[in-house]
Amino acid sequence: MGIKIKTPGVHHVTLRTADFRRARQFYARDTGVPNALEQPDLLIILAGSTAVGIRAPAKGTPKGDKFDPLRVGSRSPCYRLPRGGRTRSGCQGPDASRDREHRSEEGRDSGKRYVAFKDPDRIAWELYMAYGV
């Protein structure tokens, strides 16, 4: 039966961060993605027509809390690269100079090339060459 959602796409995705000041530096400056809104505890960047919200830690967040890709929740948000985009020389990854886990691979299921990198909270991101998908 289901609810049969009809939508033209995703409006926004929100990520919580352990250190908002550090995350704001990464997302607002290092990625080169346009900022849509900046407030004391919220940054909204635009990935094409999708807004990505970066939020300060919620009250009660344990000190030193870290992202775990094996726990329930978002695993790896992904930007779609434009047609003709390059995963190696065309994209160094927002923090390639400091992130030793920055890598270019081929997806097992899709066969598409992508670049993977991590933000300061160790949230894995991908830049994906998925045209028309």
Image: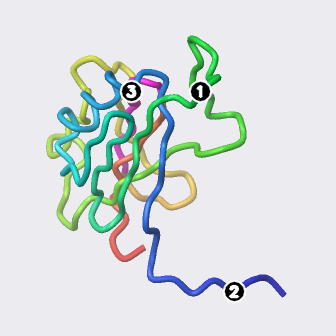
Proximity of marks 3 and 1: CB atoms separated by less than 8 Å: no
Disc 1 target residue:
59
The residue lying at 21 percent from left, 49 percent from top is 35
Amino acid identity at mark 2: Lys
- Relative to 2, is 47 above or below? above
Q: Secondary structure at mark 3?
A: helix
Q: Using the numbered discs, state the Cα–Cα distance from disc 2 to disc 3 in whole angstroms.
A: 36 Å
Disc 2 target residue:
4
Q: Using the numbered discs, state the Cα–Cα distance from disc 3 to disc 1 in whole angstroms.
A: 13 Å
In the image, which disc is placed on residue 20? 3
> Label 3 crowding class (10 Å Cα cut-off): few <14, some 14-19, many 20+?
many
The residue lying at 38 percent from left, 52 percent from top is 52
- Relative to 119, is 6 above or below? below
Amino acid identity at mark 1: Lys
For the record, the magenta segment spans 114-122
Q: In front here: 118 or 44?
A: 44
Q: In front here: 108 or 14?
A: 14
Earlier sequence position, callout 2 versus callout 1: 2
Q: Tell me if 102 is positioned left or right of 5 in this view.
A: left
> Label 1 crowding class (10 Å Cα cut-off): few <14, some 14-19, many 20+?
few
Look at discs 2 and 3 and give the one toward the viewer: 3
Report the quarter where the C terminus lies.
bottom left
Q: Using the numbered discs, state the Cα–Cα distance from disc 2 to disc 1 in whole angstroms.
A: 35 Å
The residue lying at 38 percent from left, 27 percent from top is 20
Report the quarter where the N terminus lies.
bottom right
> Label 2 crowding class (10 Å Cα cut-off): few <14, some 14-19, many 20+?
few
- Relative to 132, is 34 above or below? above
Q: Secondary structure at mark 1?
A: loop
